[in-house]
Amino acid sequence: DAKTTQPNSMESNEEEPVHLPCNHSTISGTDYIHWYRQLPSQGPEYVIHGLTSNVNNRMASLAIAEDRKSSTLILHRATLRDAAVYYCILRDANGNKLVFGAGTILRVKS
Amino acid sequence: NAGVTQTPKFQVLKTGQSMTLQCAQDMNHEYMSWYRQDPGMGLRLIHYSVGAGITDQGEVPNGYNVSRSTTEDFPLRLLSAAPSQTSVYFCASSRRILGAYNSPLHFGNGTRLTVT
């Protein structure tokens, strides 16, 4: 599976938007971009995924670069409950061996 | 739906003991997998299954066995526990869409295992 690169940590103020970047320069044409987050002492939870077009759901938006070599998870208004580790991973059509990196630790300040 | 259920939540073993971590899902998902997460680290794939009777190895399979006799259950067996297997274990499942496994993973709440 192709690898992803994320910053180790980011910090945001409460009520402000947060843009979490992810680089995946070796992405293949059939790789889906998935984002998960893990709150303290919990299992990861699905946030959003996409292939080529930007995606929106109730939790977040996913902006995918035109060349698909990078993507950005957008939390429109960060809350203290959004403090978590955010993982960006690629899942191909076989999708069997999902590799999680270290993720980005998001800290939200009140 | 209960989603993905893992039991037990906590377990302490002595070196050399064996045990089985249970994972069950009620969503009729074809794909199931086991991850371990060491303190401050990301998740590492141990084993996975794409359907009943089919299993394969992930990144760190040594010391672990799995089987998939039903769609619902995917137990993880530690045959002879070692301190290096102290970790939090997560089970995850997903359904198949249009022949591709690109649907979201659903995770359980984890089993915290300590081997002394």
Image (tube, coloured by chain):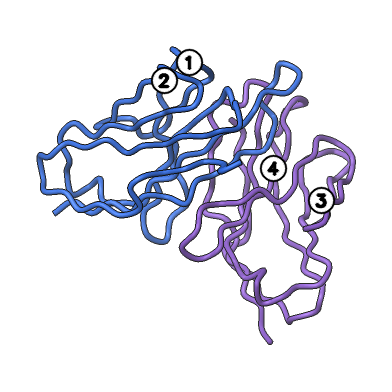
- For the N terminus of chain A, the image quarter is top right
Residue A73 at x, y percent in the picture = 76, 56
Q: Are marks 1 and 2 in contact (CB under 8 Å)?
A: yes
SS class, disc 2: loop
The dot on residue A46 is none
Give, as a three-letter code, the residue at label 2: Arg
**Residue under circle 2?**
B68
In this view, the mark in front (1 or 3): 1
Specify the chain shown as blue. B
Give the label, 4 or 2, closer to the camera: 2
Q: Is residue A99 left or right of residue B34?
A: right
How many C-alpha atoms fall within 10 Å of the one at disc 2: few (<14), some, or many (≥20)? some
Residue that extends furthest to the bottom in the rendered view of this protein: A110
Chain letter for mark 1, please. Answer: B
Determine the residue positioned at 56% across, 52% down: A44
- The percent position of residue B26, horizontal first and vertical second, equals 56, 33
**Alpha carbon of mark 1 to alpha carbon of mark 4: how far?**
25 Å
Q: Residue flagged by tag 4: what amino acid is it?
A: His
Are labels 1 and 3 on one chain?
no
Query: As drawn, is B103 to the left or to the right of B108?
Result: right
The reply to whether discs 1 and 4 touch (Cβ–Cβ < 8 Å) is: no
Local packing at callout 1 (Cα closer than 10 Å; few below 14, some 14-19, many 20+) is: some
Q: Picture coordinates of residue A75 (x, y %)?
A: 78, 64
Closer to the eye: label 2 or 3: 2
Q: Which numbered disc covers residue A62?
A: 3
Q: Are marks 1 and 2 on the same chain?
A: yes
Which residue occupies 58% across, 22% down? B30
